[in-house]
Amino acid sequence: MKNQDSQVQATESHGSSRLISFRSARFKEESNGNDAYIEITVNVANDFAVVHNIKGTTDQEAALLASCLAKRPSLSSQLSSKLRQVSREIKSSFSSSTRTNSKLVKHSPSGTAQALAGLRFMHNNVGNNDGYWSKVEARFNQLSTDGMLPRQCFCECIGMEESMEFMGVLYDALARRRGITSSTITKDELHEFWKQITDISFDARLQTFFDMIDKDADGRLTQGEIKEIITLSASANKLTKIVESADEYAALIMEELDPGNHGYVEMYNVEMLLLRLPNDSAFSATESKNLTSLISDKLVLNKDRNLMKRGCSRIRNYIHDNWKRLWVLFVWLITCAGLFSWKFFDYKQKAVFDVMGYCVCIAKGSAETLKFNMALILLPVCRNTITWLRSRTTLGLIIPFDDNVNFHEVVSTGIAIGAGLHVGSHLSCDFPRLLHSTDNEYERMEHYFGHHRPNDYWWFVSGTEGWTGITMLVLMTIAFILANPWFRQNRFNLPKMIKRLTGYNAFWFSHHLFVVVYVLLIIHGIFIYLSEEWYTKTTWMYLAIPMILYGIERMIRAFRSEYRTVEILKVAIYPGNVISLQFTKPRRFEYASGQYIFVNCSKVSPFEWHPFSLTSAPGDDHLSLHIKIAGDWTSQLKALFCRVHQPSAEINQSGLLREDLSQQSHNIHWVPKLLIDGPYGAPAQDYKQYDIVLLVGLGIGATPLISIVKDVLYHIKQQKEDKVGAKIRNQKQNMFDIARVYFYWVTREEGSFEWFKNIMNEVAENDAEQVIEVHNYCTSVYEEGDARSALIAMLQTLQHAKNGVDIVSGTRIKTHFARPNWRNVFEHVVINHPNKRVGVFYSGPRSLFPELRHLSHDFSRETTTKFDFHKENF
């Protein structure tokens, strides 16, 4: 063949780029003398050329034509590059006979939009705009050398440095299409890359994605190439299990897209798969449309231009949302102010006021509030009493028992302020004024301090009142500092020697110095300055009832722990540094889902007790815990079980240590003994007060919520069994009234799903009426719609359709990617349950707490659905 003539026709595109259509590039067959022509249509945009259509040729002729174009001498290097690009396009377009007739896939608007959402190469906030390109250009100037950007700097230059390997493959695909063989690019070439990866058209995105897989640019994807991109995508999303099973998943894709066993897949096959992927969003489009028409306008809070009205509205809403806390704080502040004022004005009327002035009034007023707060601070930590009150009484309607720890911290702040005022007034004002008083002034004080006036500070410090007060101040300061979250959770980057003195152990032991503090406080109150009559020494009166109540609490705890030694039945160590313990249930041990217990292991520490939420349900014949290894005690507990059971334990393919001890009587004396104390009340136990329940758990924070899910599932099974008998009506009315449970579990690692895998499968198998709606989210995977997770979404759909198993969690419940849109979650509940009261229970780090509480309050005010928010304290 040889080129007879060519005709060039220029046309303007809709955009700013000028598209040039090369039409009727004719090649004549000389062997038979007949004029057979091949017509090629090429679209050129600036420096980019794409073959649009080829007519009048077979596959062999197309390949020969591509070879001719690639070898044809050009007038310039730029034209040569264009022809090489056209050559590759022709090879790709005619890679098989099945594409000779140009198979096309019809695009429906909804399908195309959905597929577009699944092939986004840049973040949502990045688009093909000059504003963001200017940032890319600025980074190019910083990273380039002699006007050339190295391949390894490409991801950083475009702002996607978190996916270096994936972006490296994207760079190779973009460079391969343009015939760039060097490992550096110019700014103009970078701009071409940028325009392509930010192109919002479906065909452009599909072509880019296909090019990433098609390493040899032959227009065909082999199983090996598909395996490579699966491994790359899984690695970018930190999905190690998919990496290990890449061969199996590559075969699954080939089985789906290559039913004829040709050994390859073409672009239109991938296109068809993308277009028929179901919408993997947690909520349907119809629901979103209905919701938009129902509440979208209401949820946009209108800002009143009047600052006074806006402020009053905010105050009113705050009071409405926090009235329980506010009235308790108000009563506490009024009581403290009343006690302070009483003593202040009482001492202002006494003779000592003439010598010591207002300093003694402040010291005595603060001392009175200090005695009150030292008594009050014991009540929020009387766990048995609080558990009984919240379970057996209706006081929970007006008293926020969920905030007992927060109130304990508030009272401790009051103690710190009172102690500071009391000690500061004495040392800096009262004592100096007494030491420097005249003889006539001191005569009024002889009754309290003796005939001989003190000469120095040492007289005050060495007395019983002095050394007890100073000792208490030092001990309370240590406990107060080590209770601070920065020290308790080891957030400070301290030297190792100092760091050993902080952490949970330091907090625990320093807090138990309160025994010494209270003994010293009683002694200090007996030998108090300026008071001699027994009825004026009121310290013991404040402390008597709270100390007796707390003493009974500790006696009950010690007594229960003595006979509640449990036998461990099963041990499992899961990915994510979590150990699961299953042990016997003591007799008469009754608890509610959501409650927690204290655990002691004498082989780790005979004194330390640590709280953990139960993951078993009241209907189980055993108790279970899932413990996150996050400190010294838990690390030693894990090491103890590993050391004791490693020789006989079963280690599965995931590297998990599992052992069933219930059948191993010969090994029982080696098993560490556990003591338990509890159960104790927690916010999550109130879930039965609601018809609709929204559970939100982050990471290991899901443990109390798992117990709730198991309890609901247990009642679902019971109702099925009761339907066979005659007791269904009474049983259903007495046991279970929950209509719907929404469970959202957000975790960082795929291995975390191993923790509760059996429970998830049980829900899928037994909840036919879908009372429990489970949504699992894995945040290590890029959000649905990102090109880095597009292949994972394809695999997930194929695997779940074929085997009914999710590729991320290994359960029958499909996993969502990235983090939930919490506003959409609340909207989903609102649209399904108007005029209902919903209990929202959150368990996890504090980072999500403000957002969920804010949404609960907003939706309660702006819709007919009312949300009651509860947060687990841990």
Image (cartoon, rainbow, N blue to C red):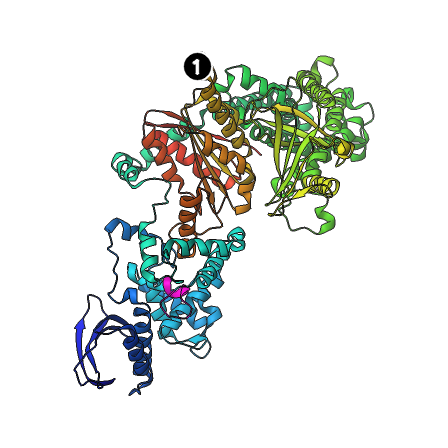
Percent position (x, y) of residue 12? 18, 71
Quadrant placement of the N terminus: bottom left
- Amino acid type for the residue under numbered disc 1: Ile
- Classed neighbour count for the residue bearing mark 1: other residues with Cα under 10 Å, few (<14), some (14–19), many (≥20): some
Percent position (x, y) of residue 503? 67, 42
Which residue is label 1 attached to? 728
Is 380 placed above or below 260 here? above
| Magenta-drawn segment | 209-220
In the picture, measured across the screen, residue 697 lies left or right of residue 62, that is right
Asked if the stretch drawn in magenta spans residue 605, the answer is: no
Q: Nearer the viewer, residue 656 or 652?
A: 652
Q: Nearer the viewer, residue 32 or 786?
A: 32
Residue 128 in view, yes or no: no
Label 1: element kind? helix
Furthest residue to the front? 32
Residue 804 in view, yes or no: yes
Quadrant of res 537: top right
Is 431 placed above or below 778 here? above
Furthest residue to the right? 452
What residue appears at the point 50 percent right and 52 percent down from the top-left corner? 242
